[in-house]
Structures are given as structure tokens and as C-alpha cells.
């Protein structure tokens, strides 16, 4: 073999005979196969695996796309020939073209989130600021459109190269959708799935121009500002307490706790108690106003004064009166024991309400000395008292 024949053979061996791509990164979206001087040898083998697409680019224009399978680059079974035009050498010379492999699998665990709060008018809280985050999955739906609109001549394109662009589009559509749906902030947690599906449909309308499709979209959390969440927690605490009186006790307990933590000691304790009771009083007034006119009238009516009957004539007199306003009798009731059974009777009673005995003082039949209640013998002479 002559020297020139060896040089020619070496040059021919530089042409690629097998064109395939094995992705070992997991996040590569597009890969340009390294063809020496963009020359592909006639008869070369093209191997496209599942979740891949091979795009031939000739003279800067996407010529054809090949799905999974094995192809031979010649003039027999390759539809690329009709698009590249007739070749004057009939593929006896190498074909100059670029080959791009596009990963068409789903790229999962993509993250999105709101960099700044979203202003929203809410029925419960007025104007609030919302933050949200979640995840999504995407894939290349149209390889030629993706190369033309996104990747360009980039030889190695990864998900991080388009991640920020996708996030901006997602946040824009999320803000628009949550404003149009007008879901109250407290009901958003129950609508995450429905909200995600609505947003995914709107996102795909825009991403279709990139040749990209969002296959899954998840809303993981929508949060309110910390001060609004604190107000919700306080409102829940009030609901758990049940009434204004218990809320006052709750406020006073909070004030005691805060005062105990205050370095000011006793002064801090007094100030904390005053603040707690003042706040509690304001809440009682507020709740009283919310209950309507009937509650206010009930609070304004003075309590009815207790009345007690006169022990002499039975006419009712105000409690605490010393003499009856009708008969002038003494209102104070003095108790004395029954002369026979010892039961407590009103002073001046003539008969016992328990045993019916006359309350006239008994006297000793022998010495006429007064006998004590229930006495069986005279204290003066010792004579037995007859029943």
C-alpha cells in the first residue's frame, strides 16, 4: 500500500460510523454529538434509544427528527434525503451535518417559588401578601422547536440553563390564576390540587412555544405573613376560650407571664397586669356591643332589691330595714328556745311550732320559782316538776 493510500484510509477512519448517546448525568436536556468536521460517513449507523430523539441539522436548519430505533445513513431508507436535497455525489462523499440528541424523558423534582410576596385582596383579611412554593415535572415535547427557540447552537444544554426562565413563567401564571379564582386565603389549602391543575393548563399555553410541556404541577404550600398568621392563632385561641370573661383571664395570664420575664420586677408586674386587664375590659366592651341592644339594656338595668316580710304583720320590706314601714314593728327576729322542747322560736311566740306547748313561763308548784325549759326538778327547792 502506497503512502497516499494510507493517508486516505486514515482520513476515512476519522468519519463516525456509529452515532449514539448514553446519558449518565440525569439532567442533560440536549447533547450535540461530536462529529469530526461535521462529516458523517455514508453507511454510518444511528442508534436512538427510548426517551431520546435525534435531530439532524444541515446548513443551520433542522432537517429531520428520528425517534427510538436503529438507522443507516444512506440513500435507501433515510427520509432526511428528501429534505436535504439531491447530492451530486450520491453519498459517495461524506455528508456534512450536525446531530443533536434531545432527552424527551420527564425531568422530575423541579422546584418553583415566589421570590417576592403576591398581593391579594381577601374577603376575610382584606389586602394580604402570599408566598407559595412547590414542584413540577417537564419534558421536551417538540425537539425541533426546542432547538430553534431555546437551545440554539448550544452543544450541552441542562435543566439549570432554563430553570430560571421556567420559574418566572410559572410564578406569573400562578399570580394570575390565584387572583382570578378569588379563593379565600383560609380555603386555599383545600384547593391545592385543583389550583395546580388550573395553573398547569395555563403554563402549557405559554411553554408550547418553547417545545416544552409541564406534565405535573404541585402546590406544596401557600403561606400568609407572620403577623397575619399570629392574628389567626390568637383568633383560634379566643374561639377555644368561648367567652369574653375567660378571654380576660387568658390575657391576665399572658400579662403575668410577660411580667415575670421582665427585668423590671414589680413595676413590670404591675404594668403587665394593668395591660392585661385593660385589654380584657376592651374585649368585654367590644363583645357587649356586638350582642345588640337587648344585651346593653340588660346590663343597664339595676339588680332588683331583695324583699323580706315583716315578722309582725307580714308586709314586705326591703332587706336591711330595721322597722316595718306598715306596722312599725321591729324587723329583727330574735330567737328563743321553746320552754318544753327547746326548739328555736321567734321572741314573743305564745305556742311552740314544733310541740305546740304554751310558752308561758312555768313555775314551781312548791316555791313558785320560774323553771327553765325542759326542767324536771326545781332549781330552788328540788321539787319534781309534774308533766
Image: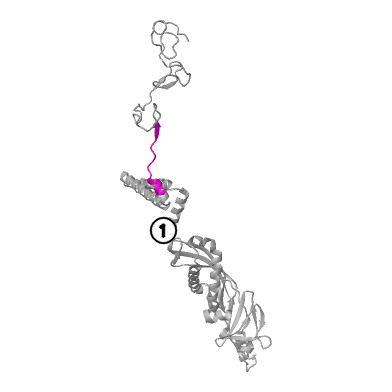
Query: Camera-side residue: 111 or 325?
Result: 325
Mark 1 residue crowding within 10 angstroms, few (<14) / some (14–19) / many (20+): few
Residue at (42, 22) in percent of width and height: 345
Q: Position of residue 74 (x, y in %)?
A: 66, 87
- Mark count: 1
Q: Position of residue 300 (x, y in %)?
A: 37, 46
Q: Position of residue 156 (x, y in %)?
A: 53, 77
**Quarter in which the N terminus is drawn:** bottom right
Point out the stretch of residues depicted in magenta. 295-308
| Image side of residue 308 versus residue 44, left or right | left
Residue at (44, 54) in percent of width and height: 235
Q: Residue furthest right?
A: 76
| Image side of residue 326 versus residue 102, left or right | left
* Residue 297 belongs to the span the image colors magenta: yes
Q: Does the rendering let one see residue 109? A: no
The residue wearing badge 1 is 227
* Residue 125 belongs to the span the image colors magenta: no
Q: Residue furthest bottom?
A: 88
Query: Camera-side residue: 174 or 292?
Result: 292
| Residue 364, quarter of the rendered image | top left
| Image side of residue 103 versus residue 234, left or right | right
Query: Camera-side residue: 45 or 129?
Result: 129
Query: Camera-side residue: 18 or 211?
Result: 211
Q: Position of residue 281 (x, y in %)?
A: 37, 48
Q: Does the rendering let one see residue 284? A: yes
Scheme by which the image is coloured: one colour
Amino acid at each position: 500500500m502506497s503512502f497516499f493510500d494510507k493517508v486516505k484510509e486514515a482520513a476515512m477512519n476519522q468519519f463516525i460510523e456509529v452515532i449514539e448517546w448514553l446519558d449518565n448525568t440525569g439532567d442533560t436536556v440536549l447533547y450535540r454529538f461530536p462529529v469530526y468536521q461535521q462529516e458523517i460517513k455514508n453507511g454510518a449507523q444511528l442508534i436512538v434509544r427510548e426517551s431520546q430523539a435525534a435531530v439532524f441539522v444541515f446548513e443551520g436548519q433542522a432537517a429531520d427528527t428520528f425517534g427510538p430505533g436503529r438507522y443507516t445513513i444512506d440513500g435507501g431508507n433515510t427520509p432526511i434525503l428528501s429534505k436535504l436535497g439531491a447530492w451530486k455525489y450520491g453519498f459517495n462523499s461524506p455528508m456534512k451535518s450536525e446531530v443533536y440528541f434531545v432527552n424527551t424523558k420527564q425531568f422530575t423534582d423541579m422546584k418553583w417559588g415566589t421570590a417576592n410576596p403576591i398581593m391579594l385582596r381577601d374577603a376575610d383579611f382584606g389586602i394580604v401578601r402570599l408566598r407559595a412554593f412547590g414542584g413540577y415535572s417537564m419534558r421536551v415535547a417538540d425537539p425541533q422547536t426546542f432547538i430553534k427557540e431555546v437551545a440554539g447552537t448550544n452543544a450541552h444544554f441542562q435543566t439549570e440553563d432554563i430553570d430560571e426562565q421556567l420559574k418566572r413563567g410559572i410564578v406569573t401564571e400562578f399570580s394570575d390564576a390565584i387572583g382570578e379564582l378569588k379563593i379565600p386565603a383560609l380555603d386555599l389549602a383545600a384547593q391545592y390540587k385543583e389550583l395546580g391543575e388550573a395553573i398547569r393548563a395555563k403554563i402549557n399555553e405559554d411553554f408550547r412555544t418553547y417545545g416544552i410541556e409541564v406534565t405535573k404541577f404541585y402546590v406544596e404550600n401557600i403561606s400568609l405573613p407572620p403577623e397575619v398568621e399570629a392574628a389567626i392563632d390568637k383568633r383560634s385561641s379566643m374561639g377555644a376560650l368561648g367567652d369574653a370573661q375567660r378571654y380576660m383571664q387568658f390575657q391576665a395570664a399572658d400579662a403575668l407571664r410577660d411580667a415575670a420575664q421582665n427585668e423590671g420586677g414589680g413595676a413590670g408586674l404591675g404594668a403587665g397586669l394593668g395591660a392585661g386587664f385593660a385589654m380584657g375590659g376592651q374585649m368585654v366592651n367590644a363583645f357587649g356591643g356586638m350582642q345588640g341592644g337587648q344585651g346593653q339594656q340588660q346590663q343597664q338595668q339595676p339588680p332588683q332589691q331583695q324583699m323580706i316580710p315583716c315578722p309582725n304583720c307580714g308586709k314586705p320590706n326591703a332587706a336591711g330595714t330595721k322597722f316595718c314601714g306598715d306596722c312599725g314593728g321591729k324587723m329583727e327576729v330574735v330567737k328563743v328556745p321553746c320552754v318544753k322542747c327547746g326548739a328555736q322560736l321567734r321572741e314573743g311566740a305564745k305556742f311552740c311550732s314544733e310541740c305546740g306547748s304554751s310558752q308561758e313561763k312555768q313555775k314551781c308548784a312548791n316555791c313558785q320559782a320560774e323553771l327553765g325549759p325542759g326542767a324536771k326538778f326545781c332549781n330552788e327547792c328540788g321539787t319534781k316538776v309534774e308533766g
